[in-house]
């Protein structure tokens, strides 16, 4: 009888052989099971800065061009994510060509335990379209980066800024894609499609194919890339980056290079310092918002949005109009990290008590933080952000330890993820409070530029 470990070793050997057959080459790295992190990349030796770690031919990528034209024509008005998911769910290739690679992918059960979009039906035998019902209110205490808490006074604001509600945005996107697929490929079950839709959601790279016109929507410029998709996320370690090097690789391969700050840096595992989509800078808010289905235990770049705290005090006031005109009012405007509140929050806070002239001077960086103004700002940060948000975290943690209503039977897996995240938010709030006491002003060194008000 074959043991589980022997079966796992066989699958890993099969994937390595398959990768080599696709023309994928590696240098000084391999993949393996990492405790509490699933599969990931590990270094086999000291690696030097600038070394090429893995090369993947374009022919091994799964892109929109991998999908047969006839199949694509049956899927008009669908996202690239939705199309690739439909292709994988219905293609015979998944049972032939991609079998070794597919052995490294998360299962549906993995997604049901980690992805908030599935939690409405976590205990059900099979996922159904009811999980996408937009009229159902989520009474589970999700962190604000996932789904903003209900508030009738802020309904108009949330409606005008739909991107703030990641969970609802995901549901609408999945629902729209599924409506196309259900008609185009009627033999695909909803649950099977959800599995591959989430797979594409979590395993793709942002990538623009050279010499091809980019797709109009930025979110559609994605590809699936074997082996490179095994690089894990982390907030520390040696960074890696991917690139197309036309001079060396004749514009036909994707390469992942070490970005070690020093030569001969010892590594136990490589950590890809980015969030979905891959080429974007790593930020705590993105990594902790549920899009990828995990939360890092430790994250020095961690941040949380605080729009829901501030907007209560800004709407229907002269401050709202000031911020709008100056380009400081809009979706995902305000955040808080371990260094304190962002500059945009400082601007919003001061709009509530400074004269317009002094406020504009502050925005321009010509008005230093006078003692009186700084004390007023700290008081508002404490009263409008820290205290209500800390109470929100306390209430959420109490609920998660003693769930009620339809969530009473919710597995400890999802609750554990949320408990971890709310505890992290409490730490961020406490660090900001400590910074205010120490006289640091609670401000991070982020961009001071206003956002465009164009839509």
Image (tube, helix red, strand yellow):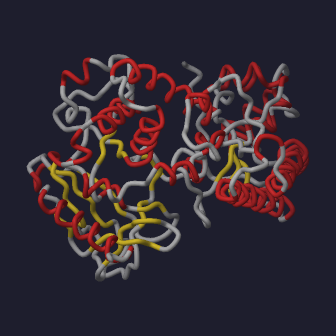
- Residue 349 position by quadrant: top right
Residue 385: percent from left, percent from top: 83, 45
How many numbered discs, if any?
0
Residue drawn at the location 19% of the way across and 60% of the way down: 19
Residue drawn at the location 21% of the way across and 52% of the way down: 254
In terms of depth relative to the viewer, which is nearer, 132 or 439?
132
Q: Quadrant of the C terminus?
A: top right
Residue 206 visible in the shown view: yes
Residue 339 visible in the shown view: no
Left or right position of 295 against 218: right
Q: Quadrant of the N terminus?
A: bottom left
Residue drawn at the location 51% of the way across and 25% of the way down: 175
Residue drawn at the location 19% of the way across and 31% of the way down: 212
Residue 331: percent from left, percent from top: 64, 30
Left or right position of 286 against 62: right
In terms of depth relative to the viewer, which is nearer, 49 or 273?
273
Residue 301: percent from left, percent from top: 59, 58
């Amino acid at each position: 009888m074959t043991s589980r470990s022997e079966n796992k070793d066989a699958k890993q050997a099969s994937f390595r052989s398959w990768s080599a057959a696709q023309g994928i080459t590696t240098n000084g790295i391999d993949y393996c099971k990492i405790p509490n992190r699933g599969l990931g990349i590990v270094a086999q030796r000291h690696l030097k800065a600038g070394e090429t770690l893995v090369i993947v031919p374009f022919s091994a990528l799964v892109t929109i061009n991998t999908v047969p034209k006839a199949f694509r024509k049956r899927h008009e008005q669908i996202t690239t994510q939705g199309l690739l998911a439909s292709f994988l769910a219905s293609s015979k290739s998944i049972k032939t060509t991609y079998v070794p690679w597919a052995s490294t992918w998360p299962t549906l059960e993995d997604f049901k335990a980690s992805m908030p979009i599935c939690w409405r039906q976590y205990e059900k035998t099979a996922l159904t379209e009811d999980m996408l019902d937009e009229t159902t209110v989520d009474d589970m205490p999700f962190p604000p980066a996932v789904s903003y808490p209900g508030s009738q006074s802020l309904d108009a604001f949330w409606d005008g800024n739909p991107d703030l509600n990641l969970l609802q945005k995901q549901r609408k996107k999945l629902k729209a894609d599924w409506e196309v697929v259900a008609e185009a490929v009627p033999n695909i079950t909803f649950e099977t499609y959800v599995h591959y839709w989430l797979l594409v959601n979590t395993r793709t790279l942002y990538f623009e194919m050279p010499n091809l016109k980019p797709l109009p929507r930025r979110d559609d410029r994605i590809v699936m890339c074997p082996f490179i998709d095994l690089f894990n996320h982390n907030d520390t370690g040696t960074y890696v980056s991917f690139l197309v090097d036309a001079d060396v690789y004749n514009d036909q391969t994707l390469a992942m290079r070490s970005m070690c700050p020093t030569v001969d840096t010892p590594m136990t595992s490589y950590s890809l310092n980015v969030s979905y989509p891959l080429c974007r800078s790593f930020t705590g808010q993105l990594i902790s918002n549920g899009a990828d289905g995990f939360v890092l235990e430790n994250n020095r770049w961690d941040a949380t949005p605080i729009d829901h705290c501030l907007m209560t005090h800004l709407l229907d006031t002269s401050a709202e109009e000031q911020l709008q005109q100056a380009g400081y009012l809009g979706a995902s405007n305000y955040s808080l990290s371990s260094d304190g509140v962002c500059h945009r929050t400082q601007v919003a806070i001061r709009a509530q008590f400074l004269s317009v002239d002094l406020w504009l001077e502050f925005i321009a960086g010509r008005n230093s933080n006078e003692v009186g103004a700084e004390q007023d700002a700290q008081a508002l940060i404490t009263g409008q952000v820290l205290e209500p948000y800390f109470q929100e975290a306390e209430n959420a943690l109490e609920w998660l330890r003693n769930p009620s209503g339809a969530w009473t039977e919710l597995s400890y897996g999802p609750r554990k993820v949320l408990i971890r995240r709310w505890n992290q938010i409490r730490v961020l709030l406490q660090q900001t409070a400590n910074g205010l006491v120490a006289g640091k002003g609670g401000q991070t060194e982020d961009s001071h530029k206003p956002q465009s008000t164009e839509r």
